[in-house]
Amino acid sequence: MQFSSQARWVWQPDSKFKEAGRRLFFRKNFDLYRVPDKVALRITADSRYMLYVNGKFVSYGSERSDYKGSWPCDTVDIAPFLQCGRNVLAARVIHLAPDVFCQPAAHYGGLLFEAPEIGIYSDSDVKVYEPAGFLRESFKMSCQYADQEHADLKNIPAKWQETDFDDSAWPTADYLRTSETEPYGRIVDRESPMPDFALISPQETLRTVWLGADVTGEEPITLYCKENPSWQQPDEAGNVSAVMYDFGRTRLGTILMEYENASGQETVDLLYTEAKLASGEPFLRTPADAGMVATASRIKLASGCGSHELDMPAGLRFLVAVIRGKSQVRTKFYLRNIAYPWQFTGKFHSSEPLLNDLYEMSLNTQLACASDTYTDCPWREQVQWWGDARIQAINTFALTTDVTLLRRGIRMLGETESSFGLTHAFAPATRWNTMIPDFSLCWVLTIYDDYFQTGETISFTRQYQRAAQVLNYFLDLRDDSGAFQKDSRYWNFYDWGFDHTKEPFPILGNMILLHTLEKVEILEKASGITADFDHTAAGKLRWYLRRYFQSGAGRKALAEPRSAAYAILDDLLEKKDIDFALDTISREIAVSENPTGASPYFIYYLFEALKKYGRAAEVINCIRKRWGFWHDLGLTTTPESWATEEKYGKTSLCHAWSAHIPAHFRDILLGVTQTAPGWKEIRFAPVYAGVNAVSGLIPTPWGNISVEIDHAAGKKNISLPQGITMVD
């Protein structure tokens, strides 16, 4: 639906032509003689908006997009916030910099809205103001993310969202563009549902006071680490105080601060972290030590009482509020949760408490790593890396039948372009250096994953031509053997720590390519569509790889667990070599002290290989040890790498690619394996694995499968919804 001609993009260009990082306030005053039962407001902004009606927070948006000829807008019902008489619609907009990974920015920012039912439009009557209290060039929260917000509340109008605020001195918008214009093109409805924006209160855990600097020009975390405060029982000697708050698990959201009794001389540094030490103290590294990560912000208080909400979401479990300037100020903090509103119907419970806790850790991770897209982590970048997203989607299948984010991501990645046919490694993306060839294969495989989960070929029918472009990139690199050779233009990821540069050719990459080619052939048969690539390629590559693994070089390659796993998954090995490869994988996952091999991401594929040949109990034992180690550290989400305390602050402690436990518990302990697209057939073969009793629900397009198992009593009950057949 197009916007009305009365609605325009409104903005106020910077006099020095510097648009990145600007924060503008907008107000639209109007009168109502009656309040309708429902008022649909359509609103969007470049890059982010916070919407208020009569001083009340309404919504945060809009969805991320990449300027491919369309731009998403939100529709919210503002009737509950309206009143008879005077009303005001207020919005705060931040225009991001082009180098922000999660949302590249256009040259100019803008706000666009309309509610035709009550005659409200973004037009020349909109008041606009740029407060002087925001520092335009501060420190970046990470090299991939936005700048820290540094706000001086003495130079930011208080209660500017309120109905009775006097905006007579504010100018009206003087830069108006038609709604359907470049770089936005068509305005389209939001694809993902709105979050609920619940305010979450933390629990105070520690409080301390120390003598420190009143000078606040330094980056907040660097300053804190330089002072190296000792978190002991506070006394009255210090001029700097700090409180640590715990939100229970890592979450993504904006921080809202309320304060009273301020003298106007206080500065509040807000430091965000996922980790604490065994002593209970927060763990914070300087940006140089943390890999260019400085998740913090700074607020200078005005006198008296007030509030301020930050506008860029942060990922954190612990909030450290450092107050500089001795005073009696009192503060409260909340996190406005910004997370995808999953409706998880998948359930798991066992007689082993540790496994129940690990399942919950995975759910917590999924909740924090999804908003309007799948994201790798909330901590440093909030980016839709597609290799991560594939594992996250597979895990989501064990929890819900909702494929909204999967299909949205498939579309967004498909719209990215490169000179050689690859997709970008994440979307949205405008950076030239974000191509990872194996992530392009991951993207094609997620089209198959969508089909296998739902039984629908809709993603393939929309993307088959783009998928063929990805395949042809690899097929153009083949030599006479049928295998593709190295391409020095790009970095193939495969897995952290996997040194594929020593290979005579990309063994693992060719096995992933074979896997992808054969899945595309299945999609073609299911959809009746033939994609434009060499359909003899899979047969030639399979023949070559089978012969390769019969050679001495191939057997040596099977000593590498990642290559061994994919050789098993692709059915490339003879019986004697299968056992050798399985033993390679078993040795890899048996390492419990300082594992350095397959990451928590790629170990998913190692687990799949073991499950395929009846060694699933080893998977559960590995989960007990490695994920159990994180549990013993007190973590409530799953980290990016095999984290120890030495890695805190250098790696994400809440990472989607590590949260694949529900998928394995479904297949192994509950014993339900999907054997046909759309869940038309399943196999039921629970594995004991030392767990006496398990129960759970497994979501499918036909309804939930219910399982209840008591190994000691010999009870294995399964209830299938109509439409699903159980096979041997």
Image (cartoon, rainbow, N blue to C red):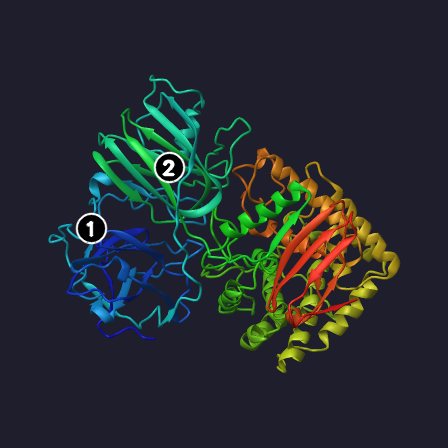
* Left or right, 682 with reference to 139: right
Please tell me whether mark 1 or mark 2 is closer to you in this view. Answer: 1
- Quick check: marks 1 and 2 in contact, CB under 8 Å? no
- Crowding near the residue tagged with mark 1, few <14, some 14–19, many ≥20 C-alpha atoms within 10 Å: some
Q: Residue, x 38% and y 52% (percent of image)? A: 197
**Image: 591 above or below 613:** above
**Residue on which disc 1 sits:** 162
Q: Position of residue 598 (x, y in %)?
A: 68, 48
Q: Determine whether the residue tagged by mark 2 lies in a helix, strand or loop.
A: strand
Report the residue marked by disc 2: 270
Which image quarter is the N terminus in?
A: bottom left
Q: What label does residue 355 carry, if any?
A: none
Residue 614 visible from this viewpoint: yes
One can see residue 596 in this view: no
Circle 2: is it few (<14), some (14-19), or many (20+) Cα within 10 Å? many
Residue 537 in picture, x, y percent from top left = 72, 74
Q: Which of marks 2 and 1 precedes in the sequence? A: 1
Q: CA distance from mark 1 to mark 2?
A: 26 Å
As helix, strand or loop, the secondary structure at mark 1 comes to loop
Q: Residue at x 33, y 30 (%)?
A: 323
* Left or right relative to 306: residue 601: right
Instruction: Give the total number of marks visible in the rendering.
Output: 2
Find residue 546 and report its image quarter: bottom right
In the picture provided, is 331 more to the left or to the right than 563?
A: left
Q: Position of residue 550 (x, y in %)?
A: 85, 61
- Residue 599 at x, y percent in the picture: 65, 47
Front residue of 706 and 255:
706
The amino acid type found where label 2 is placed reads: Leu
* Amino acid under disc 1: Glu
Q: Choose top left, top right, bottom left or bottom right for residue 723.
A: bottom right
